[in-house]
Image (cartoon, rainbow, N blue to C red):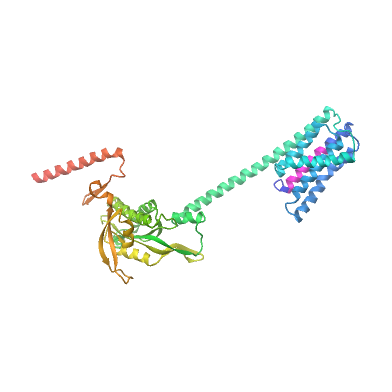
Amino acid sequence: MFSSLHSPVGRDYQARVLAYTLVALSIGFGIYKDTLPSHMIFFGVYAAVYPHIATLLFFFLNQLYPKKHKPASLVVDSMNAGIFLIAAGLPPVESMLFSMILMCSGIIRYGLISLAVIPVLMLASGGVTYFLLPQPLMRPMPVTFTLVSALSVMIYMLYLAWIIRQKHKVFVDLRDKAKAQQRRYTILASSLTKYLSPQVWHSIFVGRKSAKLESQRKKLTVFFSDIKGFTELSEELEPEALTDMLNQYLTEMSKIALKYGGTIDKFVGDSIMIFFGDPRTRGPKKDALAAVSMAIAMRRHMKVLRHQWRKQGIERPLEIRMGINTGYCTVGNFGAENRMDYTLIGKEVNLASRLESQADANQVLISHETWSLVKEVILCQSVGVLRVKGFSRSVPCYRVLDFRRNLGQKQSYMDYEAKGFSIYVDGDTIDHKDRKEIIRNLKLAAQKLEREIMTEDNS
């Protein structure tokens, strides 16, 4: 019942037995050398049998009153120490040595409160003992008894050091297991985040969102996009090449979406649905501006992707079309208790989808609500009103041109494409150290083209 070192009861039992056994041996040595009075033999017998009986009593006490046996054992041990020191009439050095055993054990088992409780209880029990059993105090002791007392303390300290070492090994083992478990959970969480938008996953992780069926009305900006002509392309390419191209496209678009703070709702084939304003919002105006800015960045980046795809043998010029709308939507968890999606529904969502389907290649169509929020920063062109499926009224729409700051002489980028030629320059992102090398290559290309033109003209 008390043999396990890792059991709190087992540790207390072993420590108490060792401490009282050392005291009993010291008393026996003192009586044998006529250093201690003869009545101390009763204390020696008591010290030898007490820890066994006390541990049983405290064990059953713990069954009846959990967590209350520790204070009781501290009180009894402190009172025993006070009675023993006064009955033996030990001088200060020997008294401090034996008190050290109790103090060290008390701190380990009960904490620093032992430093205040133990001396008070020892003084109280010692005072009562002196009143009932008057005798000389602090009688001189031979060096041999002092050495035996010091040896007892040393043995007990070594035992405590060994106990602490065992606890440390257990702690290190538990810490290593906890770290391994944490690594497994981190890997698992990292895998799960790939199935959720980072914003949604983070909101659930920190407790702002709960995994239950609930929703709310919020003003959001919704974005839809797809690749025009993707169906025809899927009939021309092998499935493996099509899969690689689609994954590359979705990866690059996702990076741009996350850069601008968009919450990626879902991928459906080549279609992407993203919304702004939940779980975090910067206000309807900034959310709308972020959505349109993202669309412009996606449109530009498609030029880079088209250049890469041409190198892979895909000659068809793939272009995306996009639709954006701002309005109140119902957003939250939809589905069943055991399987749900964090998404949004409402007519404003449907309008964004209809705008995307009405857009031409490489075009971004936005609703009047979105335009009113971004018109100060984004230059748009009205395309009039459109008859949109599912809406009884005509919808005024606008075609996104570019940021106002990028138009005119201050334009920071340029692009041009022709058969066998493609150039895309974004002055805001080119490193200063690369500019001279770019200029040199452009001059070489221009000189080569000029020589070819002169050759053709002469011939």
Where does the image place residue 176, in percent across and percent down from the top left? 58, 45
| 70 relative to 446 in the view: left or right | right
Reply yes or no: does residue 281 show up in magenta: no
Q: Residue furthest bottom?
A: 392
User: Would you say residue 226 is visible in this rendering?
Assistant: no
The secondary structure making up most of the magenta span is helix
- The quadrant of the picture occupied by the C terminus is top left
Residue lying at 84% horizontally and 44% vertically, measured from the top left: 49
Where does the image place residue 394, in percent across and percent down from the top left? 29, 69
Q: Quadrant of residue 161?
A: top right
Q: Looking at the image, which is closer to me, 157 or 112? A: 112
Tally the marks: 0
Where does the image place residue 247, in percent across and percent down from the top left? 36, 55
Where does the image place residue 397, in percent across and percent down from the top left? 28, 63
Q: Residue furthest left?
A: 458
Reply yes or no: does residue 16 show up in magenta: yes
Q: Which residues are magenta?
A: 9-24
Q: Residue furthest right?
A: 38
Residue lying at 34% horizontally and 59% vertically, measured from the top left: 239
Up the image or down, 95 lies above or below 167; here it is above
